[in-house]
Amino acid sequence: MAARIARAGVALGALVVAVLAGGCGTTARVEPPGRSERTAPADTRPRMQQVAAAWEGSAALKQWREGFHPLGALDWAPPGGFRSEDKLAAVNGHFELRADLPADPPAAAPIRWAGGGELTLPLLSAREAYGQFAQPKAPAGSERPVPVTAVRLGETTVRTSRGQAQVPAWLFTIEGYDTPLAQIAIRPQELPKPPIEPLGLSGGGTARISGHSAGSPDTASFEVTAGHGSCDGGVAVDVLEGTDTVVLAGRILPGKEPAPGQGCDLAMRMQNVTVTLTRPVGDRILIDSESGAPIEQEARRG
């Protein structure tokens, strides 16, 4: 394994600042007219270094390496994509089941990794798997649903935090397509609990990152979602890359003073910020600096 990031006192990786494009917003506190207090830009580097050092060699990182944590999008699409007449229905989850769902699948099945090792976990029923991509019933007047004509238990290949794996999957035959829709039949395990306390109230000027769109381990550029107040100038994201971790810190940008006689509302503005790494994310875990916790992948269909 490549050399791990050194602990405190040693550089933990390249610090890359990814500044978002556009977006004005405001701070989350209401300010009386005439008050000029504003959130100062945060120095995120010390906290990112602490978070990276806490994760290196931790039980949480071991759990990430040894558990079942898929990387990349789990939404299926046929080779070449859906035909134009089916695309909207598929994105909206409008499918029509014309086959019986197997009633008595095995209670559990193994995941097998290409690099060796396996893990046996409980199976989802075919009905549970179908419900993850299909709406119970298409609304009246909506587009023609896509027919599902057969269902069987099989396998699919998935990239995970410990490499490529063969994973049990429910295979749904879609009318007019040669490749079945593969829905993994095992629920991913919970993300590990952080080995460091959240920043809490001491993290003035920082923004928690709530999700990411890194849909493939091969990507080096993706979006993260962070919130800011209505009088702030938006969010920028600082990045600390290491061998096993990528720590992301949301930084609140200073905003403009509200007009005389006006304050800042309490609404949270959510913003997508583009992050570009120096190399693909691979099997590294993405961590939010403020909370110290893994960042969940967001489902972005369509």
Image (tube, rainbow, N blue to C red):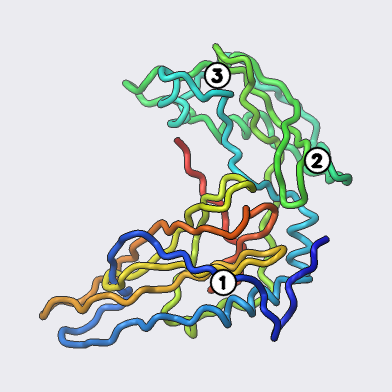
Specify which label sits upstream in the sequence, 1 or 2. Answer: 1
Q: Is residue 274 left or right of residue 242?
A: left
* Residue shown at the point (42%, 20%) measured from the top left: 84
Q: Where in the figure is residue 157, as x and y percent of width and height?
A: 73, 35
Determine whether 165 is above or below 214 in the image.
above
Labelled pair 2, 3 in contact (Cβ < 8 Å) = no
User: How many angstroms separate mark 1 from mark 2 (CA)?
Assistant: 36 Å
Residue with the mark numbered 1: 15
* Residue shown at the point (68%, 46%) measured from the top left: 70
Mark 3 burial class by Cα count in 10 Å: few <14, some 14-19, many 20+: many
**Farthest right residue?**
116
Q: How many marks?
A: 3
Residue with the mark numbered 3: 97
Q: For the residues carrying marks 3 and 1, which lies nearer the camera in this image?
A: 1
- Return the mark for residue 191: none
**What is the quadrant of the N terminus in the image?**
bottom right
Secondary structure beneath disc 2? strand
Determine whether 96 is above or below 17 in the image.
above
Secondary structure beneath disc 1? strand
- For the residue marked with disc 3, what is the amino acid? Leu
Specify which label sits upstream in the sequence, 3 or 1. Answer: 1
Q: Where in the figure is residue 146, as x and y percent of width and height?
A: 49, 19
- For the residue marked with disc 2, what is the amino acid? Ile
User: How many angstroms separate mark 3 from mark 1 (CA)?
Assistant: 50 Å
User: How many angstroms separate mark 2 from mark 3 (CA)?
Assistant: 28 Å
Residue with the mark numbered 2: 111
* Image quadrant where residue 132 sits: top right
Determine whether 132 is above or below 249 in the image.
above
- For the residue marked with disc 1, what is the amino acid? Leu
Mark 2 burial class by Cα count in 10 Å: few <14, some 14-19, many 20+: many
Specify which label sits upstream in the sequence, 2 or 3. Answer: 3
